[in-house]
Image (spheres, helix red, strand yellow):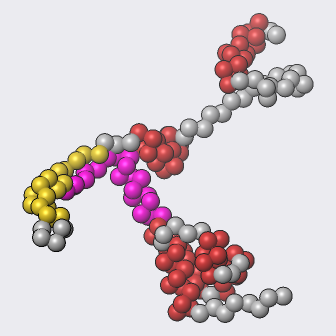
Amino acid sequence: MAPQAKYNPKYHDDWAWSLVIKGATDKEIAEAFGLSERTINRWKNEYETFKIAMESGKEAADAKVERSLYERAIGYEEVEEKESVLEIDKDGNRKPLKVKTVKKRILPDTMAGMYWLNNRQRKNWSQRQDVNVNSTNTNVDLSGLSDEELRQLIKLAPEEEAKGG
């Protein structure tokens, strides 16, 4: 059995946090440390400061993504600087003589909005569809039917029940 890696809170906590804030997974952190993912999980259970470093980094990274998704969903303004006239100095370096600031409106993204609402307002915005097909014949295999064929069957079901069939 290989010797267990020594945990150093001054070293591992900060390094783990810096990796997690950039989106690294536990597996990727283990690889960076030269350890197994099992050791990372054990350290989270045994060392409170390591657990806090990992959790706080993940929360901060997730918050950045949530903020970006929210801005994408509602649209946002962006300031862009464009260098329009350049001068080349005696050393051959290019210097802007005129910088134009342009404010652009980024339009809302429908898919980002749908994703946001589907996750935050499940009751009102869920995209899940429940389809119930009742049959007395339990030997019917519907798995080979296309979505369109299943829709046709659903439309026919009430008509058959009304006829008593």
Q: Which residues are magenta?
A: 62-81
Residue 28: x %, y % from top left = 61, 71
Name the quadrant of the N terminus.
bottom right
Task: Tell me if residue 102 comes above or below residue 11 in the rendering.
Answer: above
Indicate whether 136 appears above or below 33: above
Residue 96 shown left or right of residue 18 in the figure? left
Which residue is painted at 60% across and 38% down in the image?
128
Whether residue 18 is visible here, answered yes or no, is yes
Q: Residue furthest top?
A: 163
Q: Residue at x 35, y 52 (%)?
A: 71
Q: Could you tell me if residue 121 is visible in this image?
A: no
Q: Is residue 163 above or below residue 34?
A: above
Q: Residue 69 colored magenta?
A: yes
Depth check, front residue: 130 or 4:
4
* Res 160 → quadrant: top right
The foreground one among 99 and 108 is 99
Give the residue at x 13% y 58%: 86
Residue 39 x %, y %: 70, 81
